[in-house]
Image (tube, rainbow, N blue to C red):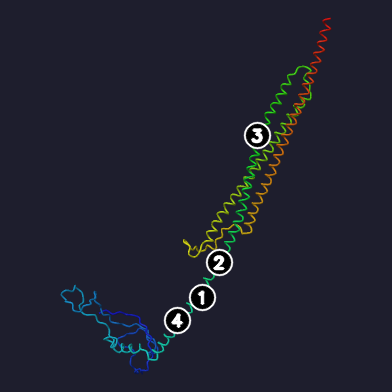
Amino acid sequence: MAKEVSMCTQLQQWSPVKETPGAPSIPPQVGYCFHSPKKHPWRPIMGYEEIEVTPMPSQPITNTMVDPCYTPAGMATEPLRFPNLVTGFDRSPEHAARAALYTRYTQNEWNQNSIKNYNESDAKRNFSERVRNDIMRMLRETDEIGTQGQRDSGRRIGERITDTTFWRNEVSIEMERLVATCEKLNDTRRQLERAIAGIEGPLHIVQECLYHREKRQGLEQVHDAVEQSLLKEVATLRECQDKFRNMLEKVRQQSKNCRATQHELETDLRNKEYALGIDNMCHQLNNFSKGLQFYAGIERYDPTVCDAARWAAASAATLQRSQSERAKAVQMLSDAENLINVSATEIWDQWSNTNSAFTRRIAETIEIKNKLQLHLHKVNLTSNL
């Protein structure tokens, strides 16, 4: 039979039983490789103990009434044997009895242990009650904080909706005014283009007149008032064309500036419409709204690029810039209209002066022609005599 060496450590309780002098404190079947200096039963005993090992069956059986002829080879048919807690091991009854006596407690210890358990249960129950009360108080406080936060957020979102609606309306009104001004600028631009094209006809006629007057013969090529009027008319027409072209260039540049400002207003209006839609949706949310989700750390994410004061200042600056461009456009419309009227008056006056000069020159030429014919007739009569 095999033997197994194991390390055992046991703290034995104190007992009033007097130990027999000279008798060994442990069974003689146990061998030690280490001895304690004081051999007392309430001291811990440390050492190696040799215990006989009883081999167990390879396959346990639960029915003791098994016929040996039906059991497989090598299976033990003997019932299992468990150690007796009273008598102990077969080979060490004294050791077993001592172990059974030393593991018991007194009635006082049992009562004290029960009272300890009662007190510990009361303490745990009181602690649990305090924790539950603290949790309920925290829940009420959290609910009050959340409700107050929702009221404040709703009030602030309402104020934000009011501010955004106000600036949205201001931007929309200013954009309508700017669009109307841009339409007037386009009309003025077309008028200037037609005026420039319309001057080409009179200018061509005046130049044709000068070219035809170059066909005069001899002393008739006089730098008379008609020629001076024609040259002055050419200069007036070209000067008016240059003024119209300069004004047309300014109108086109102002149209570009107004269009750029209109684009800024449209962008600002579109952004405000988008923000207003988001704020209206947020203002209508409540605890029973569908699709509510919690995003951890969203309070630390700030996608804004400015505060409320800077936002209002930016909107006011956009409106002020639009009003400035619109004022420039209105002034330019007035200047273009005045230029067209003044130029038309100058061209008309110069055309009238040229016609008057032609009339006087034709009358003078006819008069001189008649006198020459009279003198020619007299000369012919004298030569015939």
- What secondary structure is marked by label 1? helix
- Pointer 2: residues within 10 angstroms few (<14), some, or many (20+)? few
Report the front residue among 105 and 5: 105
| Residue shown at the point (64%, 39%) measured from the top left | 187
Q: Which residue is mark 2?
A: 151
Instruction: Tell me which corner region of the image, top left, top right, bottom left or bottom right, holds residue 7.
Output: bottom left
Q: Which mark is residue 137?
A: 1
- What secondary structure is marked by label 4? helix
Between marks 4 and 2 in the image, the one whose residue lies nearer the viewer: 2
- Pointer 4: residues within 10 angstroms few (<14), some, or many (20+)? few
Instruction: Tell me which corner region of the image, top left, top right, bottom left or bottom right, holds residue 69.
Output: bottom left
**Looking at the image, is 273 positioned above or below residue 243?**
below
Q: Which mark is residue 125?
A: 4
In the displayed structure, does residue 205 sit left or right of residue 53? right
**How far apart, in angstroms, are the residues tagged by discs 1 and 2?**
21 Å
Name the amino acid, label 3.
Arg
**How far apart, in angstroms, are the residues tagged by discs 2 and 3?**
64 Å
Between marks 1 and 3 in the image, the one whose residue lies nearer the viewer: 3
In the displayed structure, does residue 32 sit left or right of residue 367? left
Name the amino acid, label 1.
Arg
Mark 1 vs mark 4: which is more N-terminal?
Answer: 4
Name the amino acid, label 2.
Arg
Between marks 3 and 4 in the image, the one whose residue lies nearer the viewer: 3
**How far apart, in angstroms, are the residues tagged by discs 3 and 4?**
100 Å
- Pointer 3: residues within 10 angstroms few (<14), some, or many (20+)? few
**Looking at the image, is 369 positioned above or below residue 15?**
above
**Looking at the image, is 202 positioned above or below residue 46?**
above
Mark 3 vs mark 4: which is more N-terminal?
Answer: 4
- What secondary structure is marked by label 2? helix
Q: Which residue is mark 3?
A: 194
